[in-house]
Amino acid sequence: MVNRALITLALFATPMLAQAEKIAVVDMGEVFEQLPQREQISKSLKAEFGDRVAEVQKMQEEMRSLVEKQQRDGALMSDAQKTELVRKMESLKSEFQLKGKALDEDMRRRQGEEQNKLLVQVQKAINTIAGKEKYDMVLQRGAVIFVKPEADISSKVVEALSKGK
């Protein structure tokens, strides 16, 4: 009786094992690199932070000129002038560091927000392609060691997102 049960179970399990799953792979890094939306995001972030970047660069240039002045005219300056110049440089340096750090954090945060929006679009495109082509599973390229080129749908994702701009 046990043997019959095992044979029956084996007969039912064989068709399930024979049905192979259809698996696709997506290289997310490649997809993000090739998206035309990436350049649009970059332009919008430059426009959004352009004034602040210019201000920080101006401060950096001003600091550079003060250092040059100190090196060039330091021997000719009085102690009071040297002290005033050093204080001005330190004040400018601390303001530069503060504004530079704030700018860097704000830019990183906004870039993350824009990338998350793009990630949602990429995920929708992957889901659409997987549904149309009846894939059972879609993995990230880094999760697999080997994949046939036919199973890589990265270019299809980029194409879908390029059309949908």
Image (cartoon, rainbow, N blue to C red):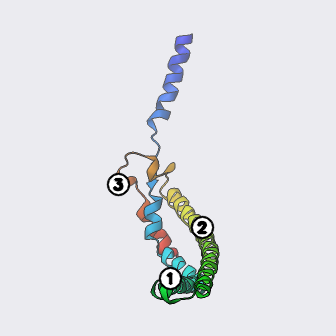
In the picture, the disc for residue 112 is 2
Camera-side mark, 3 or 2? 2
Give coordinates of residue 97: x percent, y percent. Answer: 61, 74
Q: Could you tell me the amino acid type at mark 1?
A: Val
Asked if the residues shown at circle 1 and circle 2 are in contact, with their CB atoms under 8 angstroms apart, the answer is no
User: Disc 1 versus disc 3: distance between alpha carbons?
Assistant: 57 Å
Q: Earlier in the sequence, mark 1 or mark 3?
A: 1
10 Å neighbourhood of mark 3: few (<14), some, or many (≥20)?
few
Q: Secondary structure at mark 3?
A: helix
Give left or right: position of 85 versus 141: right
In the image shown, does 72 or 130 lie closer to the viewer? Answer: 72
10 Å neighbourhood of mark 2: few (<14), some, or many (≥20)?
few
Identify residue for label 1: 67
Give left or right: position of 79 versus 142: right
Q: Is residue 19 shown above or below 63?
A: above
In this view of the protein, can residue 17 be seen by the observer?
yes
Identify residue for label 3: 149
> What's the residue at 47%, 29% (across, down)?
14
Residue 118: quadrant of the picture: bottom right
